[in-house]
Amino acid sequence: MSTLQQTIKAFVSGTHNLLPNEIIPKDAASASANWITKDGHIELSYGRQAQGGSGAAGKNYGEHTGYRADGTVVRFRKVEGKIQTLVGSTWTDVITGLTVAADYTFTNYQSLAGAFVYIFGIDGIYKIATANPTSYTSLYDSARNFKGLAFIDRARTILWGRTEDGTGLYGSYIDSQTAVSGSTGVYTAVTGEATTSLTGTLAFKAGGATRTAFAVVITLTGTGEVFTDHYNGVLTGSLGNTGTINYTTGAYTLSVAGTGTAAYQWENSNVRGVTDFTKSATRLAGEGFVLRQDAFGTAIKVVIPLDGTYFSLKSNCSYKLELDTTDLAPDNNIFRTDIGVSSLRSATGTGQGIIFMNTANPSKPVLNKLTRNPLGDSFDTVPLFPHFKFENYAYDDVLVDSWDKYIIVGCKLDSDENNKLLLCDVKNKTVDETSYGIRASTKANGFLYGGDPVSQTTYELFTGFDDMGIALTNNWDSKGETWGSSILKKVKRYRYKGKIDPQQVVEVYVQQDDGSFGQIGTILGTGDYVDYTSSFAVGTSLVGQDTIGGGDTVPVYGFFMEIKFRAGKFRKRVIRFVATGIGYVSIEEMTDFDIWTFQDKLPSKYRSKQNVALAGAPDDMANPDY
C-alpha cells in the first residue's frame, strides 16, 4: 500500500463528452450544465432576466440592435405577427399584421441619408429611421423589389428566401448616395418650402409614401433663428430653442412660434437605392441582378458575406458568389457539396470566418469554420471542438451567433424547442452547456439578448445570479479519474479552493466505478474556511472589464476547505458539484489529498466466479451447451 495526492491547479479544458470519461484531460468535465470554464477556473453560470417583462405564449422570430447617428442603441424584435421596438422598458408595436410563423431578418444601414434599420420578410420590406423607431416606411413594390430575407452589404441588398423562388439569389442597385441628376442619383433637394408655426409636416411625404427625409434645416422668418438637423431626430436652434423631426412622416415640432422656410433632402430607396432590384434590358454595372443557385433543387437557407464573397448555404451544398470590380462578371459556383445547414440562423459571420453548424450528415453534426486558407487564394472548412459530442443535440431550429469571445449555439436536448445554449470558446477550445433556450439573439453594449422559442419574451442573458428569480439547475462532473492505473484506491480527504458568495451553497458528490452519486460534503458560503478578511469584486454579468465579469459588482470571498471521507476501494471516481443557492461561486483548485493504493484487482461489483471460461457463465451447469 502507498499514498499519494493529485492537484488540479487550473481548469482550462471545458467539457469533453465524446470519449470515455477516463481518458479526457484531468481538469475537463465529463458532463456539465450551467458551469462555465473561464480564466483557469470553473464558475457557476450567470442568470437571465426578462427584458421588457415576460410575454404571452408565442415565439420569437427575430432580435436586432440598431443605432442612431449618435450611437444610441435602438432595439427591435419580431414576435408572432408584429415588429416591436423597446421604448424605455416596454416593447411597443411598430408593424402589425405580419405572418405569425415567419422569421424576419434585420440589417443596419447608414448612409448620407441617415441611420436606418431595414426589415425583410415574406410580407414585405420595411424601413425604419432609428431616430424615429415607432414610425416605418413600407417599401414593397412588385415592380421594383421582392419579398424575402436579406441584408445590406457594400451599399447593396442581397436577398434570398422568396416563396416563389427558393433557389434564386437577388441583388439590388448599389446605392450611389448622390443627388438626382438625369437618370442617376437618389437624393432630391428641396429649398424654400414654407413652414407653419410650432408644428407641421414637410411636403415630401405627400409626393410619395416610400420617401424619407434628411438634412433638415428650418429658418424662422421673424427671428432669423436657424434650426439644424443633427441626424438624431433633434433640431437645434441657433438662438437656443429646440425642435424635433420625424424623417419618416415629415412631422416637425418647434419649441418657439414662428413661420419660416425649410430646406432638406429626401430619398426613395426604391429608385436606384438599396430596395430597387430592377435592371436594364442589357444590365449595367451597379444595377439589380438575379443569379441561379439551383443545385439539388433545395432552397437557400442563409447567405453570409466573407471578405467580399457571398456564401449561400443550403441543406446539402453551398454556393460561392464573387462580384468582380466591374460588377458585370459575377463568379457564381458551387463551393462544396458535403456541407449544409438546417435553418436561417445556422451560420454567422465573424472576424475568424463563417461559423456554421454543418448538418449535411445528420448523424454527425459538426460546428465548422469557413475561412481563407493560409495562402489566401481559396477557402477551407475546418471542424471545431472535435472533443465535443454535438450529436447529443438537435439542430433543426439552431441558432449560431457570436458574442464576446464565444460562439453561441442554441439547440435542443430531448425537447421540441431550443432549450440549451452552448458557449463555445474558439480560442481556448472549450465548450460549456447552459440551460437557456433561445432561437434568436442580438448584442447591445456588451450584453447578450435572446428571444424565447415558446413565449413573446426577450431575455437579457448571463446577468445576475438567478434564473428569473430562482436558483439555476446545475451540475459539474469531473473526469473519471483513475490516476493512470487500474489498481484499487481509497481517497481519505478532498480539498477545494475558490471564491464564493456568502449566500451560496455547493454540494459535493462522488461516484465510484460508475455507481450512483453520493454526497460527501458541502461548501458553505458562511463556512469557517471562508476568508472574510479580504473580498473580491465580481461583476454581475459574465463578460466585461471588471475584476471578474462585468456590470455592477458584488463582493465575494476566497475559501479553502477540506472534506474527509470514508469509502470502500474503487478503481475510478467522478466528483460532482451542485450549487443550490443564488450567488457567485468558482472552483479554482481541486486536490485528492490522501490517495491510498492497494492491489491490482477488479472492483468488487465486477467480480464473479467462473467454472467455464468459454461460456462465460458463473456455473457450467447454467449453460446447457456445455
Image: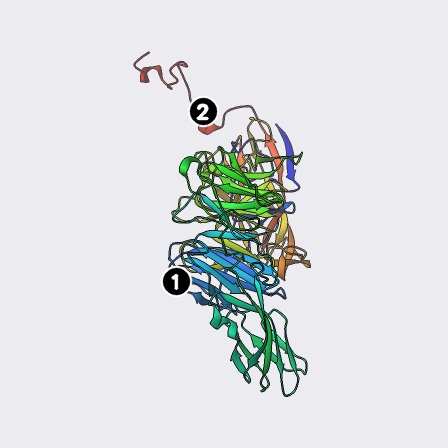
Foreground residue, 227 or 50?
227
Report whether residue 471 is seen.
Answer: no
Residue at figure coordinates x 42%, y 35% from the top left: 296
Badge 1 amino acid: Ala
Residue at figure coordinates x 52%, y 52% from the top left: 172
Q: Is residue 375 above or below residue 131?
A: above
**Residue most extreme to the left:** 624
Residue at figure coordinates x 57%, y 58% from the top left: 184
Residue 293 lies left or right of residue 595; in this view the side is: left
Badge 2 amino acid: Arg
Q: Quadrant of residue 220?
A: bottom right
Q: Residue 270 in the image: x percent, y percent?
A: 50, 59
The reply to whether discs 2 and 1 touch (Cβ–Cβ < 8 Å) is no
Q: Which residue is mark 2?
A: 607
**Position of the N terminus by quadrant:** top right
Q: SS of the residue at dot 1?
A: loop
**Residue most extreme to the top:** 626
Numbered disc in front, either 2 or 1? 1
The Cα–Cα distance between marks 2 and 1, rounded to whole angstroms, is 57 Å
Q: Is residue 208 above or below residue 57?
A: below
Q: Quadrant of residue 182?
A: bottom right
Q: Residue 245 in the image: x percent, y percent?
A: 56, 74
Q: Residue 303 in the image: x percent, y percent?
A: 51, 45
Foreground residue, 608 or 378?
378
Query: Which of the two discs, 2 and 1, labels the residue nearer the N terminus?
Result: 1
Q: Which residue is mark 1?
A: 56
**Position of the C terminus by quadrant:** top left
